[in-house]
Image (cartoon, grey):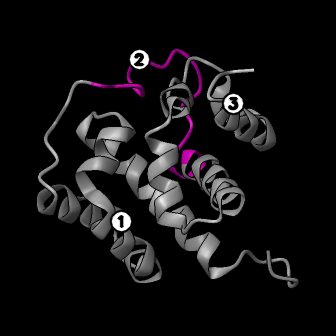
């Protein structure tokens, strides 16, 4: 965080990147891990680096571009349709992932995109994306400890 009460540019760019991943996953009905791996590190770095530019465009248009460019096919994972309770927005989920990715990057002394890849490929990603559980709105510190222990505590 910057002293003026605003998040850093890097934090905000990561928030957009994670939100876009969730948006694409919902749109194509895929697990977030699949979407992240299809996008790949090179395009994830591009999204992260240009997030302030992409954020000015319509997210539907941006998602269509990356779905086509990265050949993300439609799947059958519908955590939104399967949800029996209030559905978190892709912005809500982007914030959850952003916080966890930042903690992993700091703890492991790695870049944001490398940490993003690790988080989305961890066991915790499927837990966060189960909107019928309470995991996605758990305390960020708790999620980080679960990530570190590689299990729910």
Location of mark 2 (residue): 82
Instruction: Choose between 113 and 75: the one closer to the eye.
Output: 113
Q: Is residue 135 left or right of residue 15?
A: right
The disc, 1 or 3, on the residue closer to the chain's N-terminal end is 1
Question: Residue 44 — which label?
Answer: 1
Highlighted range, magenta:
77-93
Disc 1 crowd rating (10 Å Cα; few below 14, some 14-19, many 20+) is: many
Disc 3 designates what residue? 149
Residue 118 appears in view: yes
Question: Residue at left 69%, top 30%?
Answer: 149
- Of the two numbered discs 2 and 1 in the rendering, the one whose residue sits closer to the viewer: 1
Tell me where residue 30 appears, x and y as whole percent: 29, 34
Q: Nearer the viewer, mark 3 or mark 2?
A: 3
Is any part of residue 26 visible from this angle? no
- Name the chief secondary structure element in magenta: loop
For the residues marked 3 and 2, what is the alpha-carbon distance in whole angstroms? 28 Å
State the residue at coordinates (78%, 35%). 142
Label 3 with label 2: CB-CB less than 8 Å: no
């Amino acid at each position: 965080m910057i002293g003026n009460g605003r998040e850093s540019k890097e934090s905000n760019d990561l928030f957009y990147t994670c939100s876009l991943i969730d948006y694409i996953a919902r749109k194509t009905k895929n697990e977030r891990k699949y979407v992240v791996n299809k996008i790949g590190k090179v395009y994830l770095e591009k999204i992260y680096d240009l997030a302030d530019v992409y954020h000015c465009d319509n997210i539907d248009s941006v998602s269509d571009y990356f779905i086509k460019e990265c050949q993300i096919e439609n799947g059958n994972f519908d955590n939104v349709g399967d949800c029996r309770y209030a559905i978190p927005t892709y912005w809500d989920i982007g914030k959850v992932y952003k916080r966890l990715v930042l903690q992993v990057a700091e703890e492991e002394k790695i870049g944001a995109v490398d940490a993003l890849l690790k988080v989305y490929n961890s066991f915790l990603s499927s837990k966060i994306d189960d909107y019928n559980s309470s995991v996605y709105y758990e305390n960020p510190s708790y999620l980080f400890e679960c990530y570190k222990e590689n299990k729910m505590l």
